[in-house]
Image (tube, rainbow, N blue to C red):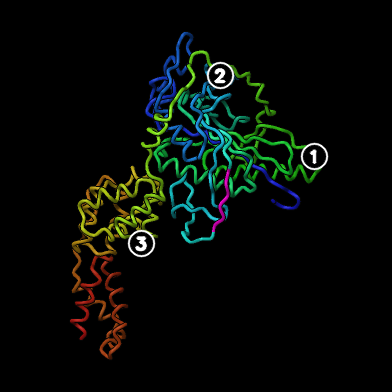
Amino acid sequence: MIGTNIHLMIGLESHIQLATKSKLFCSCSTNSSAEPNENTCEICLGYPGTKPTLNKEVVRKALMLAKIMNCKINYNSKFNRKIYFYPDLPKSFQITQYEEPIAVKGEFSIDVSASRLPNGANLSGAALDHSATAATEKKTIHITRAHIEEDPGKIEYVGGHIGTAKYVLVDYNRCGVPLCEVVTDPDFRSIDEAVTYVKKLFHLLSYLDIIDPNQEGVMRTDANISINGGKRVELKNISGSDALEKALKSELSRQSFLFAQGKVIEQETRMYSEETGTTILLRKKEQEEDYGYIREPDLLPITIDDAFVQDAWKQMKKLPEEVESEIISKYKLSKQIAYQLAFKRGLYAYYQSCLKYLKNSDLLAKWLVGDFLKCANWHNYEIEKCPSSEKLIEFMQMIETGKISEREGKELIKKMFDDPKKGLGDLAEKKGVDLDSVISEVLKENQKSVDQIKAGDPKAINFLIGQVLRKAGFKGDPNEIRKKLEKLLT
């Protein structure tokens, strides 16, 4: 319940770009960093006489997605043509699965009081608070269907949004990129629930390499929202959980205002404008029959057997909870550290690759889930963009042998992220510091602390250590400084 006498219902349609090297029906690359219209061919541009060929890897990835959504698999599914006219659709129809999708009737669990994801997890720029022991209440979101389809192109509105742009550009690189659309029942009763669902789904898909989180726009969501059992409004093409939250709040505010005025909420398709912070009308909502679905004549039905399904599922990585249990059992690490290693995508594999050349598994884990993960989250890096495992091994060897102190290590690991091209030797290079001279200066400047120590108060030495470190630019080992001070004062 939102506000006075406002009952909210939300359903989501997530368009998920599956991580494949080539497109759904041709051999063009799916790389999103290419120049505009570079990754195109006669097939994905819909030239007359061309024939699509199904990419088998797309089917495997769709089956993996269906498994984490706990869907029932359709062993016989088929493609349809969804006919509509828009500048980003060169064929004037989209190949999708309408009548017989690859998967139906699933369930996906979310925590409605807190999101159990790692602190600072990279989720389209959105960090989640983590408390492994926080009280949570599970809610099941019912999945209507999951179906395979091709992506249209990308429209760029130059100088504004759809209603104010000076002109429009179209990039067809995205035409034919493989999508799996996951449609939920209207089970969400709050905006927080919808946002939690999107965050958890994105995290799992990234973790299992079903999507590539480094690619642009790999998960775009359409949200259907209604209040008090009225007509639903569809919000199109929302990227990321932050944008989803803003869009839903804006549309809820609009509908609540209309309801309070006694006005009718019409069934519409709208988009959220970051520029105005409001939703903008695109068109009056079409019905399904407006699209004129027909069977796709150029593609045979997808017929799979249980062996193919099981083979696809065997290729899946372990779920984060399974990895967490393995870490605790194998390395005897604490549950908190094991949780962080397990739930951050790629971090456990990174840990294992480093540990082959190091002695102290506890120390490595502490640095990885501590300062290393903080720096990765600060830079919004996935594991692929972090310093190489070879560089971290060298760093940890310097820590293990005492070549650098813990304080120096914290500064050095920041430099590893800030200046990744520099070698560790250059980054760790110290300017000469004469500790004896610095200590002598500090003792002269802090006679009161010196007198306290000589009078039998050992606690004052910690203050002097701090003063020496500050004056030396933190270029010293606190233990070495303590020994020197104790030698001089006792």
Of callouts 2 and 1, the N-terminal one:
2
Residues at marks 3 and 1, CA–CA distance in whole angstroms: 57 Å
The residue beneath circle 1 is 263
Instruction: Look at 44% across and 40% down and name the residue there.
Output: 205
Instruction: Look at 50% across and 32% down and name the residue there.
Output: 73
Please name whichever residue, 212 or 125, is drawn nearer the observer in this view of the structure: 212
Instruction: Look at the image and tell me whether residue 218 can be seen.
Output: yes
Q: Main secondary structure of the magenta part?
A: strand
**365 over 248 or under it: above or below:** below
Question: In the rendering, which numbered label is found on residue 81?
Answer: 2
Question: In the rendering, which numbered label is found on residue 457?
Answer: none
Q: Quadrant of residue 222?
A: top right
Instruction: Look at 47% across and 59% down and name the residue there.
Output: 131
Of callouts 3 and 1, the N-terminal one:
1
The amino acid type, in three-letter code, at marker 3 is: Ser
Percent across and percent down for residue 312 are 39, 33
- Which residue reaches farthest right? 262
Left of 402 or right of it: where is 313? right
Please name whichever residue, 238 or 195, is drawn nearer the observer in this view of the structure: 195
Question: In the rendering, which numbered label is found on residue 334?
Answer: 3
Element at badge 2?
Answer: strand
Q: Dot 1, how many residues are within 10 Å of its Cα: few (below 14), some (14-19), or many (20+)?
A: few
Q: Which residues are magenta?
A: 136-141
Instruction: Look at the image and tell me whether residue 172 can be seen.
Output: no
- Which residue reaches farthest front? 306
Choose mark 3 or mark 1, whichever is in front.
Answer: 3
The amino acid type, in three-letter code, at marker 2 is: Arg
The amino acid type, in three-letter code, at marker 1 is: Lys
Q: Dot 2, how many residues are within 10 Å of its Cα: few (below 14), some (14-19), or many (20+)?
A: many
Element at badge 3?
Answer: loop
**135 over 477 or under it: above or below:** above
Residues at marks 3 and 2, CA–CA distance in whole angstroms: 53 Å
